[in-house]
Image (tube, grey):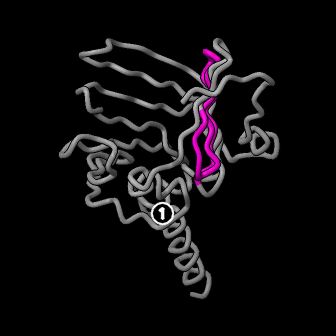
Amino acid sequence: MRTSLFLVMISSLVAQIEERSFEERLKDSLTNVESLFLQSSSSPIFGASKEKGQLFIGEKGQFRMDYDSGISITSDGNTIVQYDPSTRSATRSVVSANLRSHGLWSIVYGQESNGITQVTQVKPNVYNVLGFGITPKGFPIQLRFGDSYLESIQWVDSSGGTQILSFIKMKPLHVEGRKRLFLALPDKTRWVK
């Protein structure tokens, strides 16, 4: 009798651990992780394109995206810098209040997100989310999860094009990956306004 009660308690605990909420799964996928990525765009204005690279996400809005083309985008949580090695130029933007109000940024920044207005599970591990603030009004973002982490984010941009950011081999951010969160620009980098 004691053995069967113990097994029931253990199986209940395992079920609770495995059934993490949507918000917990999303936060785990957007905090202290690194991944290869494939960014696919299909726009009626700009046409189709695909770019690959590597992504590192820390805490409090820290991230770095290194595209195979050489372009790097980094954030320390307050400022976003984009560097283009082909022109040895960089641009710097302050993270605006508008961006900070987006639900997805709140999660990357490590705050409680009040931007999610509606989450609908459309299939196992697939969710449509309204209210993140990065899509035209009325268009959801679709998030697909694998067993452990986020596999892709799909949305419609302001041009009516479809954007898909797919994550490949996402894993916890290790010491070497954490060092990559910071971008050291070469001497004589030209700053563009």
For the point 62% across and 18% down, which residue is it?
Answer: 68
For the point 55% across and 67% down, which residue is it?
Answer: 14
Quadrant for the C terminus in the image: top right
Q: Is residue 153 left or right of residue 128?
A: right
Residue 31: x and y in percent read 60, 53
Q: Nearer the viewer, residue 190 or 32?
A: 190
Q: Residue furthest left?
A: 138
Is residue 72 found inside the magenta-colored segment of the image? yes
Quick check: can you spot residue 19? Answer: no
- What is the three-letter code of the residue carrying label 1? Arg
Neighbour tally class for label 1: few under 14, some 14-19, many 20 plus, Cα within 10 Å: few
Q: Is residue 144 left or right of residue 42?
A: right
Q: Nearer the viewer, residue 148 or 103?
A: 103
Residue 74: x and y in percent read 63, 38
Residue 63: x and y in percent read 62, 43
Callout 1 secondary element: loop
Give the number of marks: 1
Quadrant for the N terminus in the image: bottom right
Q: Residue furthest front?
A: 193
* Residue bearing mark 1: 20
For the point 64% across and 21% down, which residue is it?
Answer: 89
Q: Nearer the viewer, residue 50 or 135?
A: 135
Span shown in magenta: 61-81
Residue 101, by quadrant, is bottom left
In the displayed structure, 2 sits above or below 161; it is: below
Quick check: can you spot residue 152? Answer: yes
For the point 60% across and 81% down, which residue is it?
Answer: 6
Secondary structure predominantly adopted by residues drawn in magenta: strand
Q: Nearer the viewer, residue 93 or 181?
A: 93
Residue 191: x and y in percent read 63, 27
